[in-house]
Amino acid sequence: MNKILKTIGKVSLIVIAGFVIGSCTSNPDSSGLEYMPDMYRSPAIEPYVDYGEVRGRYNIDFATNQSALTPPSNTIPFYGIDKENVMMMLPYNRLPSPAFASTHGLFGWNFTKSTELDYEYNLAASDVNPLKLTADNSEAMFLAGKNLYTANCLHCHGEKGDGNGPMVVSGAYSGAANLSALTIADGQMFYSIYYGKNMMGAHASLVNKKEIWTLVHYIRKFQNAEYGTFSADGIAAVVSKDTTKTVTAAVVTPKK
């Protein structure tokens, strides 16, 4: 009996050792043999992944299908626990005009009850950029703004913000605003980027609120080269309201 138990024990040890050794690999990026893959990898659908091919297994029905679906209405992504950042990223409190459903493709959006086309746009003149520009963060802010501008704005508005981007110069598009000559308030610039304005379409699905406010800082640089520069004492050379002629929101009563 003892011999049988010893034999079983030895065999068990050999089997266990085989599993342990078999799970090892010389590839530092490999997790080795995964006995329970769901403990290592999330089974949830991930955005921007083509599930037509997963670990060598092919499913033509899933190939090239969109996995980054539109979130359910009124849901809010998790933006951490920093109060200022969370408040900034909450749903935008300004609403578009009902006319934007046909002019800017905002089908199914919530619209202002006012029949005045620029009612909410005028109110947005009082909105202040929540991203404070300081001597410590200005370089990083403008670098982030440049990257966002290059990806989303340069093709129409041009490298210098003069409205002569490649799309305009080629003749494929017209009506791009000269950003270097804008005389609107920060909040109105945000509103225009978020919902679109005149010939420009809405960018709310392309850049988030923090990114739009970053773009506002970057665009201000076109209008005044001294914007975002600071003295040795950390004093700003100019502030936003000195950079442009701030438009005061007109008092408009919504029509019922």
Image (tube, rainbow, N blue to C red):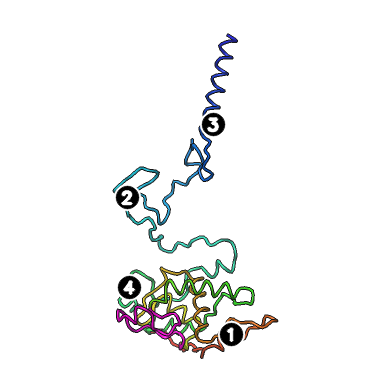
Task: Mark 1 or mark 4: name the one nearer the start of the chain.
Answer: 4
Q: CA distance from mark 3 to mark 4?
A: 59 Å
Q: CA distance from mark 3 to mark 2?
A: 36 Å
Q: CA distance from mark 1 to mark 3?
A: 65 Å
Q: Which residue is mark 1?
A: 239
User: Dot 1: few (<14), some (14–19), or many (≥20) neighbours within 10 Å?
Assistant: some
Q: Which residue is mark 2?
A: 62
Query: Residue 243 falls in which quadrant of the image?
Result: bottom right
Task: Mark 3 or mark 4: name the one nearer the start of the chain.
Answer: 3
Q: CA distance from mark 1 to mark 2?
A: 52 Å
Q: Which amino acid type is shown beneath numbered disc 3?
A: Ile
Q: Where does the magenta region start and end?
A: 156-181
Task: Mark 1 or mark 2: name the one nearer the start of the chain.
Answer: 2
Instruction: Pinpoint residue 77: horizontal percent, then vertical percent.
Output: 48, 61
Q: Secondary structure at mark 2?
A: loop
Asked if the residues shown at circle 1 and circle 4 are in contact, with their CB atoms under 8 angstroms apart, the answer is no
